């Protein structure tokens, strides 16, 4: 184990030029190396983000009613999970969600709708409310609306949307095992449309769906190639009524290795511990903020998160501070440095 931290840091320094084998070695590292791995990931995190934490607030603006067959999702057509099902919320409800996001000191308000992609009515409603959200509450807005055409992406950009969330979810090799109604390439096309429209990419995935370690690495590498500015890492919540119910393949130590691998592969990206953190990290949640620099505060789409007060206390006890993202710009070295 001697020199393990230096070995991991060497990988971080060379990650822009390859590193699949090194990334795989992180996921397969002996548990005795976990502290050295966390120390290496933290040093990279500190270089770009200091001891800051960015908070996101998620609003499920349309629930269920989805024609896709994603096996992990409680809102899909193949799910029998007992979840609320409703069409797009009204303007006043969306504004109330934004108010709550601001009250909880979130940097970003995430507006999510279920479905393959937005209808014209849904897109019009979103583009109409985004300017009001931004002017009232000063929040960044991340829209998660499913598959998008280039023209739809341009309309979101014109409305003031800062970033679009569209997760790769897993590797291209494994994608067909979790969904058959759209493809990995469909997701890439949406991300390219978002980039071409001038918005930031928020894209990550789900770990624990039966994939191999190599699939997790390939997803991290694909996100690096896309230059995703924000990467949410979800750990599968095997919700009863979904095809993946009963799938338990994770432990807290492996989840921490996943976060460290994503940090070292994507050193400058905002890395968020997303769905499943309470379930799978448990008492080790705080350690996840040594590689990651972002959390969702509050609930997820159809599952509960821990109380915001617990998140605030965890951040404070680590000696970290909540930020709205200014420190990253200050810490980024000049071109060529």
Image (cartoon, grey):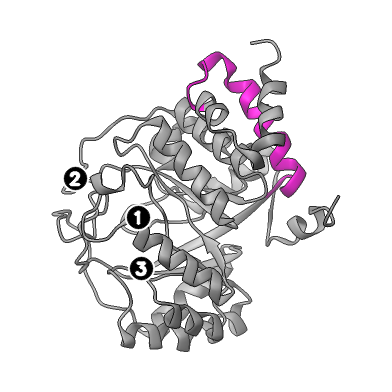
Mark positioned earlier in the residue sequence (1 or 3): 3
Q: Are marks 1 and 3 in contact (CB under 8 Å)?
A: no
Q: State how far apart marks 3 and 2 are (Cα).
A: 23 Å
Disc 1 marks which residue?
184
Q: State how far apart marks 2 and 1 are (Cα).
A: 25 Å
Which element type, helix, strand or loop, lies under badge 2?
A: loop
Residue lying at 31% horizontally and 48% vertically, measured from the top left: 175
Q: Indicate the position of residue 104 as horizontal and vertical percent values.
A: 56, 62
Q: Magenta region: which residues?
A: 27-52
Q: Would residue 51 be counted in the magenta stretch? A: yes
In this rendering, the label closer to the viewer, 2 or 1:
1
Tell me the crowding category of disc 3: few under 14, some 14 to 19, or many 20 or more residues within 10 angstroms, Cα based: some
Residue lying at 34% horizontally and 83% vertically, measured from the top left: 122
Q: Indicate the position of residue 213 as horizontal and vertical percent values.
A: 41, 31
Disc 2 marks which residue?
240
Residue lying at 53% horizontally and 27% vertically, measured from the top left: 21
Q: Name above or below for residue 188 compared with residue 133.
A: above
């Amino acid at each position: 184990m001697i020199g393990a931290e230096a070995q991991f840091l060497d990988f971080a320094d060379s990650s822009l030029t390859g590193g699949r084998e090194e990334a795989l070695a992180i996921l397969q590292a002996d548990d005795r190396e976990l502290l050295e791995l966390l120390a290496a990931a933290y040093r990279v995190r500190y270089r770009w983000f200091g001891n800051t934490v960015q908070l996101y607030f998620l609003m499920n603006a349309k629930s269920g009613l989805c024609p896709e067959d994603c096996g992990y999702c409680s809102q899909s057509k193949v799910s029998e999970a007992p979840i609320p099902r409703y069409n797009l919320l009204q303007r006043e409800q969306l504004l109330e969600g934004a108010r709550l996001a601001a009250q909880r000191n979130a940097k970003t308000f995430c507006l999510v709708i279920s479905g393959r992609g937005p209808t014209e009515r849904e897109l019009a409603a979103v583009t109409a409310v985004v300017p009001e959200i931004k002017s009232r509450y000063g929040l960044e807005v991340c829209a998660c609306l499913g598959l998008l055409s280039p023209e739809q992406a341009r309309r979101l950009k014109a409305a003031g949307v800062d970033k679009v969330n569209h997760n790769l979810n897993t590797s291209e090799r494994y994608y067909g095992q979790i969904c058959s109604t759209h493809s990995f390439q469909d997701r890439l096309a949406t991300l390219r449309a978002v980039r071409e429209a001038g918005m930031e990419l928020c894209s990550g995935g789900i770990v624990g769906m039966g994939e191999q370690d190599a699939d997790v690495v390939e997803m991290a590498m694909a996100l690096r190639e896309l230059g995703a500015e924000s990467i949410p890492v979800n750990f599968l919540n095997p919700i009863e009524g979904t095809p993946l119910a009963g799938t338990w393949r994770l432990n807290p130590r492996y989840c921490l290795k996943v976060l460290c691998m994503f940090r070292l592969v994507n050193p400058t990206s905002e890395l968020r511990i997303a769905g499943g953190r309470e379930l799978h990290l448990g008492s080790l949640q705080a350690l996840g903020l040594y590689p990651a620099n972002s959390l969702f505060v509050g609930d997820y789409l159809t599952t509960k998160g821990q109380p915001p007060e617990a998140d605030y206390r965890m951040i404070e006890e680590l000696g970290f501070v909540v930020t709205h993202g200014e420190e990253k710009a200050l810490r980024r070295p000049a071109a060529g440095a």
